[in-house]
Amino acid sequence: MTNVYLAGPFFDDEQISRIERVEQALAANPRVTNFFSPRKSEIPGLTMGTPEWATQTFQMDVSQIDQADVVVGMVDFVDDQVDSGTAFEIGYAFHSKKPVVILHEKDTTLNLMIAEGLHAYVQEAEALAAYDFSTLPESHYHGKVI
């Protein structure tokens, strides 16, 4: 069974809709024991944007990546640009030798650092419901990179 960290932006309605679909797919996957979604993990009693909130949120998220077996990263943001927080989480996971499964639903060019650092590449959130997180089959991105 697998513990998953879900990295992805949730700043507008489209992103929230997409991350909710990923959360549902991970919840439906029988090989996922648990997943951590920062969207659902706000720290009670802290005001968003304050230094205390920033420090505690950063520490919580990094700790959750450390505890994860795999990171799922949603790389669709605006055009060819990945959300900077998501990019950090993916890079931190890669450096920590965690497999990174990239979800790339939009028809955009992928940054070479993401393309070269991923373990598996999927193009639909729903595919994560059936992905075998126990054996972690490898797949690669074959499109254009920047």
Image: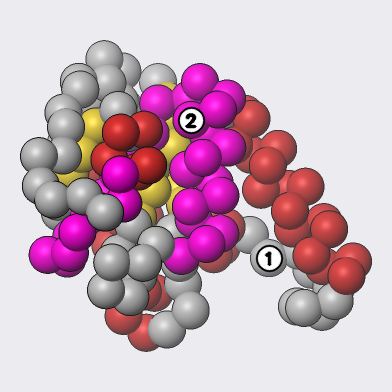
Residue 97: tell me if it is visible: yes
Query: Can you identify the residue that label 1 sits on?
Result: 42
Relative image position of residue 25 (x, y in whole percent): 26, 50
In the structure shown, which secondary structural element does the residue marked by tag 2 occupy? helix
Give the farthest residue toward the bottom. 13
Q: Which mark is residue 57?
A: none
Question: Considering the image in quadrants, where does the N terminus appear?
Answer: top left
In the structure shown, which secondary structural element does the residue marked by tag 1 occupy? loop
> Horizontal placement of 65 versus 29: left or right?
right
First of labels 1, 2 by sequence position: 1
Q: In this view, does 12 lie above or below 93?
A: below
Tell me, yes or no, whether the two marked residues, 1 and 2, touch with CB atoms within 8 Å. Answer: no
Which residue sits at x=19%, y=59%? Answer: 109
Q: Is residue 96 magenta?
A: yes
Q: Is residue 49 above or below residue 125?
A: below
Relative image position of residue 62 (x, y in whole percent): 68, 42
Q: In which quarter of the image is residue 115?
A: top left
Nearest to the observer: residue 91 or residue 146: 146
Nearest to the observer: residue 34 or residue 88: 88
Q: In this view, does 135 lie above or below 73?
A: above
Nearest to the observer: residue 137 or residue 145: 145
Q: Is residue 106 above or below residue 34?
A: below
Q: What stretch is highlighted in magenta?
A: 83-112
Which residue sits at x=38%, y=48%? Answer: 73
Question: Considering the image in quadrants, where does the C terminus appear?
Answer: bottom left
Query: Can you identify the residue that label 2 sits on?
Result: 94
